[in-house]
Image (spheres, rainbow, N blue to C red):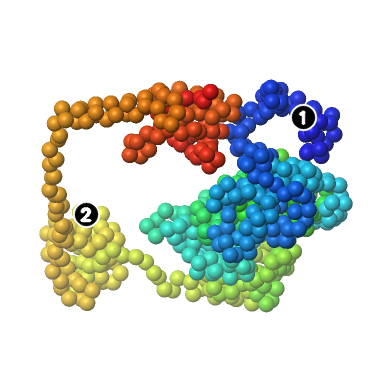
Amino acid sequence: MAIAPLLGMDEGSTAALLRDLTTAALLWRSSEGTLLSRTVSDVLGPHPAGLGPTAETVGHSLPHDLPGALERLTAQERQILERIARHGPSAAVPADPEGRAGRAVTGLIDAGPVVAPDAQHVLLPREVGLLVPGGRILDPAPGTDAASARALDADDADSAATASATEVVALVDELLDRVDDLRPRVLRSGGPAVRDLRNLAGRVDLDEASATFLLELALGAGLLGDDHALEPTRRLTTTVDEWRALPPASRWVGLSGPRLRSLRASVVPAPEDGGRVNALSEGPVWPPVRALRRELLEILADLPPGSSPDGAEMMERLRHGRPRRMPHGADEAVAALLREGEQLGVTGRGALGSFGRLLLSDEVAAGHLLETPVPEPVDRLLLQADLTAVVPGTPVPELAALLRRSATLESRGGASVHRFTETSLRSAPDSGWTADELLETLARFSPSPVPQPLDYLVRDVARRHGQLRVGSAGSYLRSDDSTHLEALLTHRDLSHLQLRQLAPTVLVSPVGPTVLLESLREVGAVPALEGSGGVVASKPAAPRITPRRERPVTEVAPEPSTEVLARLREGEARADKQRNTPHDGAPTIPALDPASSSALLREAAADRLPVWLGVTDAVGSTRRFVFHPTTVDGGRIIGEVDGQPQVFSLHRITGVVIEG
């Protein structure tokens, strides 16, 4: 069987595959042999296996000693030839003919392995396309044994993945606190300002790329959102408290599960901007990344536990699984996805962890499996005389909330160190805590008494808290007559002003000066408006608006209907005459509706027959020519005219006649 060597399989397996494809109506038997069905060509294109037409079909003469001609190629020419054979069968000619790539393509054309059907493209004949990869149209499947990948102990991979998973949960939790304090602004693109992003990264002691990844995780898990204010900022959502109340393993599932299903990528291959995107904006949305991320994890899941292939081997396995569906810039995207898996804790040291493997099928079960290696949250802290507290593990939610209100994180790891300062302790009184309540709660989590320096600092901050009061007022009312102000303060008709006395001669109200002024005049008072300098000011004049200007109406006299009808009839007669007049042996092409034209073109494409086509251009002129249709899809007809690829819209087709 001639096709078996092309696939690198035995004849029995190849025959079974052909029977399955024929049963599925993807192949059909004709007088010329087994051919592809029209649907396969429509979906996969005219060259599903990447093989072009034969040299005889395109009128090209190959070198007599083709293997010898390939051996005499330079390294650059050989590299370009292999790339065309892998992604071909055609490629665009480089824009710079004097560059390295341009000179290599010119050398290939001169040597004869490729042919130039036009000035912009080169085509690889089928004979060369089979010879370059060694007579096979498919690369051999990469091995799946442990020898094909760097083998690790499965327990080591799980330990590394568990450490990364625990760390990413802690980092996201800490970053959320920084976001709540900073409230980064939302730019028009949807992302934060560069200054805010750098400030966030500096406060968590991370680089900008890592901080961006953590923000993307929080956004995907619904922990961050846009407040949609007049000057929008990023704020925590209502699900943050629910997420923080979960065990660490469940919190990790809440981050990794949405990321696995997300359309957002760390690196978006884009030639125009070099792959740089703005965090939290719509720029990182790249639809191919969802399938690419899952396929990479499935490739790792198919390997033995502990197998850690490098990036080149992952690309080889990925290309073998999707040879015709590799997106642009896949190398950079795959490398970013592998780094993402390490940061998230799905993989450890390049190998898929046991709970990461389970994440593909059952997220809840993956969380339960992660609970075993992750230590239980601790409910104690060690208070020290240097105003620090050591937490030997992950704190329980209540202890974590207490530390967020009263201390700052100084170092993280297996045991975290928190420092109490005057600035950090101000958050506790702001939240309504008294000094006794805070000290009592700290003593409940500490096995030893609260150190005296910490006790003094807490009570000193609580004593000085509130000595200065800051509030807001919309307007004020002052008078040298305190008795008059007291009467207004108790007036029944002024209760809606919510007047409050700050001094015997000063009242304030949350309403604006204009409302206060009019309300006082309604009860018979005679107030005056005071400016910012304390001088009586006049009431500001109301702003004026510009009236709308009406545009003059331009009247166009309609043409007489008789003249329009006469011109239409005249044009129709010219079109009929042109359609029925033979041109250079061309047959008469009758007018057809789009449905009939589409049906005839589909039949001609299926039978590989040329047709006489009538096409109307943009100015209404009709031209006729011989057309070789290959695909009819989406209201377009794709084929060739004189060996050149052409695409026509179906609504411009006036008629079709199948030649012969």
Residue 433 visible in the shown view: no
Q: Nearer the viewer, mark 2 or mark 1?
A: 1
Tell me if residue 162 comes above or below residue 198 in the rendering: above
| Residue at 85% across, 34% down | 10
**Residue 114, percent from left and from top:** 66, 50
Q: Is residue 514 above or below residue 578?
A: below
Q: Nearer the viewer, residue 647 or 335?
A: 647
Circle 1: element type: helix
Q: Position of residue 132 (x, y in %)?
A: 75, 49
Q: Residues within 10 Å of mark 2 (few under 14, many from 20)?
A: few
Q: Compare residues 186 and 428 and report the one nearer the observer.
A: 186
Q: Residue at x 44, y 54 (%)?
A: 227
Element under disc 2 = helix
**Residue name at image x 54 percent, y 33 percent:** 628
Q: Is residue 426 left or right of residue 260?
A: left
Q: Position of residue 148 (x, y in %)?
A: 84, 51
Q: Which residue is mark 2?
A: 492
User: In this picture, is 435 found above or below 545?
Assistant: below
Residue 334: x and y in percent read 67, 54
Q: Quadrant of residue 170?
A: bottom right
Question: At 77% across and 50% down in the image, what residue appears?
Answer: 65
Local packing at callout 1 (Cα closer than 10 Å; few below 14, some 14-19, many 20+) is: few
Rendered position, 301 above or below 406: above
Is residue 98 visible to the viewer in this orientation of the structure? yes
Relative to 481, 652 lies left or right: right
Three-letter residue code for mark 2: Arg
Q: Which residue is mark 1?
A: 17
Under mark 1, the amino acid is: Leu
Task: Work out whether residue 414 or residue 421 is closer to the camera in this orientation and state it.
Answer: 414
